[in-house]
Image: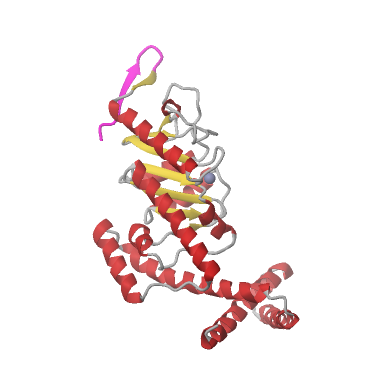
Amino acid sequence: MGYHTLHYCNILSMPTIKETSNETKLREDLKQVCNLAYNKGLISGTEGNFSARLSEDLILVTPRNSHKGSIEISDFVTVDLNGTTISNGKKEPTSELALHLEAYKKRPDVTSVVHAHPPTVVSFSVAGLDFNQPAIPEIIVLLGEVPTVPYCEPGTHKLGELVGAYFEKHDAVILDHHGVVTLGKSIYNAYYKLESLEHAAKIMHSAYSLGEIKNLEESSIDELINQRHKTYGKKVELREGKKLFRSVNSTFKLKNVFKKLTDNNSPVFQRVISLVNELMLTAVQRTTYCQKLSITEQEELSKELTGSFLGMILGRFISKKGV
Ligand SMILES: [Zn+2]
């Protein structure tokens, strides 16, 4: 990709950049997706950051604290893969630069990285729910498994390293209590993945509010996974993804059922919860491993076990009764 020409100025020993038409086009495309993400409500204020590969080791990235709805093509900052700013302007690169650099280092095939805070996807994460179930064919084919990266403080090197480990297998990841990162073979490709993920989350949110999620048949999921394999050549994650889909689905159901239970203020239900919780706490305190935990941790664990246990029992009851 001959995007870019570097001319070194001997007097100042600083690289200066002569823009090529390709670079201008990249800047225009980056501005376009920044505007799209802002106008579509996938970011607000100065949130989000976007980047594109100029050459093997040079990246164009949004500046720190920039409003993506009114960004100009001259605002984008050029950095190298070590994070050193190359451009002559005074703007600093995004505070999430580490995250972008990790993606480019880990994935030579990636030419663009998008990080945004899509509200529905983030809402699921804040609620402790994973919407990524095999219920929407397009998402299985386009993104396969979309893992959630454990929470880490935004704008840190640690977050970049943590997320980087996921980029080897995934083109889209959810950052717990934070946002989404998508990778693409073009700026638009990375951006479309973000849009699709938020759209899927909206559908799942509506379906969740209407009742229980009905996933696709196993045979249909297999077919879609094969389609993904043929289209994108992804191999490893698919089988793993299918296993994850199952576990996520059962977790989702349990939480959904337990939510219904706890939303019901019936004193009988509250008494049942309290009795089961007492039993769970006794069991936890008698388990050798759990004796190493603090009282608060033991209590929290017993509450979680109570939720899972009652959710499972009530879930079976509901499915038998067809409620
Ligand atoms: Zn963020």
Instruction: Please count the marks in the image.
Output: 0
Q: In the figure, residue 141 lies in which quadrant?
A: bottom left
Residue furthest out toward the top: 11
Q: Quadrant of the C terminus?
A: bottom right
Q: Is residue 53 above or below residue 125?
A: above
Residue 81 in sight here: no
Seen from the viewer's position, the closer of residues 250 and 300 is 250
Furthest residue toward front: 210
Q: Nearer the viewer, residue 167 or 19?
A: 19
Which quarter of the picture shows residue 288?
bottom right
Q: Quadrant of the N terminus?
A: top left
Give the left or right position of residue 219, taking residue 182 as reference. left
Relative height, residue 149 to residue 16 (above, below): below
Looking at the image, which residue is at 41% across and 34% down?
Answer: 31
Residue at the image position 42 percent from the left and 72 percent from the top? 215
Task: Report whether 169 appears left or right of 255.
Answer: left
* Residue 121, position as x, y percentages in the image: 51, 56
Q: Nearer the viewer, residue 233 or 315?
A: 315
Q: Position of residue 139 (x, y in %)?
A: 38, 60
Q: Position of residue 298 (x, y in %)?
A: 69, 72
Image spot of residue 295 (x, y percent):
73, 70
Q: Residue furthest bottom?
A: 320
Where are the magenta residues, as a range?
Answer: 1-13
Above or below, 200 relative to 42: below
Whether residue 306 can be seen here: yes
**Residue 2 magenta-drawn?**
yes
